[in-house]
Image (tube, rainbow, N blue to C red):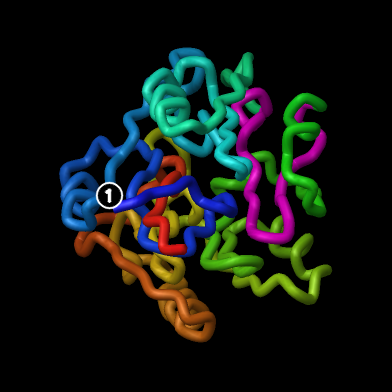
Amino acid sequence: MKKRFLEDPNLPENKVTTVYADVDDIALKNAFNDLSIKVINIVENQFLDTPVCRHADILANYIGKSTFLSDKHQIELCKFIEDNNGKSVIIENIKSPYPNDCLLNFADIGDYIICNKSILTKEIIDLLPKKAIIDVKQGYSKCSVCICKSNTIITDDISVYNAVLQYDNINSLLVEKGSVHINKYDYGFIGGCCGLIDKNTLLFNGDLTLHSDFDKIKKFMYDNDVNYIDIKGKPLTDIGSIIPIMEIDGD
């Protein structure tokens, strides 16, 4: 079976074969096994606070054209990328406290990149795809955005929601915070508990029906032809996103 890196960050065209995610839970491991999806292991960054030291959306970001920006500790990820003829660009000084833990926490949603532009270094901005940047107050932009399909998002951050409302071609849903768990903090983020594993299928780390806005989320996804797989009986838990890396080459 021929595989390829995603053409567009976060937006697979076909079945995903490889993801980058913090899988330290037997239920999520089983879900990936059942879906025949390989998971690239994350190396803990000891300079980050414990709850986020293995979060994929803190430690790496795919910017397209087989190129990844990566925390220097992510040896397995970098090796996998290079073994598959991709390119890794190492970003230094990813560490706590905020905002130094947000250098790679931006969301490419298709035609736009959502980020707090003041946090990103010039080095990173120069490497980004030549897309319009939507500047928001939220530093944890990728965490805060569930990317459903191109220019279609669910967010639990009001600054992100208000910013994207200015764009007619972005379809967005605002949901309440508080239904996504994370150790130590009061709440996690909606984007941090999920990721696309096929063109129209989201995988959630937990039971989506337990979200306080489940009915709104279900309708929004139905209206946008997006399906989902979840883990029944488990609280929705922020693991730092599920980042799709490779997919079946269906061309």
User: Relative to 153, does residue 108 appear above or below in the rendering?
Assistant: above
- The answer to which quarter of the image holds residue 99 is top right
Please name the residue shown 34% across and 34% down the image. 40
The percent position of residue 90, horizontal first and vertical second, equals 59, 19
Please name the residue shown 51% across and 29% down the image. 59
The percent position of residue 238, horizontal first and vertical second, equals 41, 46
| Magenta residue check for 120 | yes
Q: In the shown orientation, is residue 95 left or right of residue 117? A: left
The answer, for residue 187, to whether it is visible in the render is no
Please name the residue shown 44% across and 48% down the image. 4
The percent position of residue 216, horizontal first and vertical second, equals 49, 79
Q: How many marks?
A: 1
- The answer to which quarter of the image holds residue 195 is bottom left
Bounds of the magenta span? 99-121
Q: Nearer the viewer, residue 55 or 189?
A: 55
Q: In the shown orientation, is residue 12 left or right of residue 172? A: left
The percent position of residue 91, horizontal first and vertical second, equals 62, 20
Please name the residue shown 48% across and 59% down the image. 12
Task: Give the amino acid type for the residue marked by disc 1 in the picture.
Answer: Ile
User: Relative to 62, does residue 155 appear above or below in the rendering?
Assistant: below
Crowd tier of the residue under label 1, counting other residues whose Cα lies within 10 Å: few below 14, some 14–19, many 20 or above: some
The answer, for residue 12, to whether it is visible in the render is yes
| Magenta residue check for 114 | yes
Residue of label 1: 37
Considering the numbered disc 1 on the image, is that residue within a helix, a strand or a loop?
loop
Q: Nearer the viewer, residue 236 or 220?
A: 220
Q: Magenta: predominant secondary structure element?
A: loop
